[in-house]
Image (cartoon, rainbow, N blue to C red):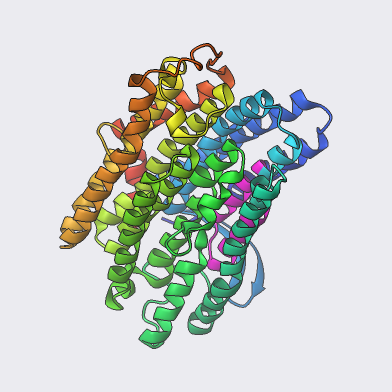
Amino acid sequence: MDPVVSIRPLLAITVAGLAALAVLLLNNRERLRDLVSPLAAIAMFAIVVSMAPTVLAGGTVELRLFEILPGIDFAFRVDALGMVFATVSSLLWIVAAIYSIGYMRHLNEHAQTRFFACFASSLAAAAGGAFAANLFTLVIFYEVLSLVTYPLVYHHEDEEGWRGSHKYLVYLMGASKSALLAALALTYHIAGSLDFVAGGLLAGSHASAALLTVVYFCYLFGFAKAAVMPMHAWLPAAMVAPTPVSALLHAVAVVKMGVFCVLRVVFHVFGTGMVGGLGLGIATAYLASFTILMASVYALTRDDLKARLAYSTVSQLSYIVLGAALLSPVAMVGGIIHIAAHAFSKITLFFCAGSIYCASGKRNISDMAGIGRRLPWTMGAFFVASLSMIGVPPTAGFVSKWYLAKGAVAAGETAFLVVILVSSILNAAYFLPVSYAAFFQPERQEESRTTVREIPLVTIPLVATAILSVLMGIFPGYFLTLADGAIR
């Protein structure tokens, strides 16, 4: 099918960018300012899904703007893999925008205009990365995303915020400035282009195996947003940000940009044939497995709910990397759809953490005994999202883990099947005690006299995302079709 030339990829990015500008201009008109993000999110989602029929039919939507250097264009190309990322990020921006309004108003947070402007800018950068036609365009939006989310991490402007945001910037910008720049230069030297190619841009090149291995690991660690150990420490440090930012970082834009970039490298820069031929797939799979298990162990030791969720994210992201590294078609499908499954479930969990804090001021799991009887909708949604993270049917997490497990068997790598099963047990070990304490442990006597109640603008979005986690588990067809198209 011939590509469809359209301005819609640029339009989706522009809507989010203009939303950021409108937020700044409406600084003194709070009600209008707060309406901008939800309306822009709906418009962006509508533009994204308008391209879905073409992509589901096996086509692409393209737009080339201008040439930077011979073989390097600033260009957009909407394909199946990009549509997975764009659909998830644009859809979840709608609920995140509503949640953020309720959260920021309830806590009377300062610098709300800056917050909403940077939030919208980050979604523009995420869309740009999803629709990038080549490595140059992808890295540009990758770097923009790091810059516009920095003020969000530093939002509280205190010493803790400074330390967390400093580590955030050093890891994300430092890694990209060194490893990514080297990888881009070497790729261009070898191939004479940076365009994504089905089967791999570097496939068939005559470069030495040693050089190609160096380039591969420069990409793997340079895209530090994927949080593969040891490039993970920025992610728990970023928990100093407000909860809506944590939800953005861990479910929608930042970490998904990281694993999305890794998938692009495996599928469209090296190609699965070359990754397998060089032995890079099995090496990556072991590294991802180590990250999955160790991050789960770290999560078990954290009493702060957001910190536990942060290490859970480090672990869950490596499921996506593992799916790609196993190189079997079934495993790759599982890795791709885990982008959506994790997004719907993890944003719910962070929304719940924010709802608990808004309603009660509690951060630590040890202080949450009996809170489920005060916040039944919040903790009910938390339980549903936890089941998805564990991989219990009929939730979204079951679908992705099922494909990952089948893929490990199909690849003849039963060791990684064990990793998936053990990690699911660890997931249960650090998620289920939260729900048990909330619903079945008695409240402390002094806390029974305090007023704790659900906040509608905070609670409605988290219930909606919990429902999405179940709906994707029951009706996974859209994402399965896209994932199947992405690996062809």
Which percent across, then down, holds residue 141?
61, 58
Q: From what the image shows, is residue 188 above or below residue 226?
A: below
Magenta residues, dominant SS class: helix
Q: From what the image shows, is residue 329 above or below residue 313?
A: below
Please identify the quarter of the rendering in which residue 284 is found. bottom left
Which percent across, then down, holds residue 348?
45, 33
Q: Please state the extent of the stretch shown in magenta in the rendering.
A: 119-147
Residue 295 appearing in the image? yes
Residue farthest to the top, as pictured: 449
Please identify the quarter of the rendering in which residue 416 is found. bottom left
Who is closer to the viewer here, 486 or 298?
Answer: 298
Is residue 479 located in the magenta-colored stretch of the structure?
no
Who is closer to the viewer here, 322 or 235?
Answer: 235
Which percent across, then down, holds residue 41?
60, 35
Which percent across, then down, holds residue 181?
58, 74
Is residue 141 located in the magenta-colored stretch of the structure?
yes
Q: From what the image shows, is residue 453 above or below residue 352?
A: above
The residue drawn where x is 54% and y is 31% is 354
Residue farthest to the front, as pictured: 446
Residue 35 shown left or right of residue 127 in the figure? right
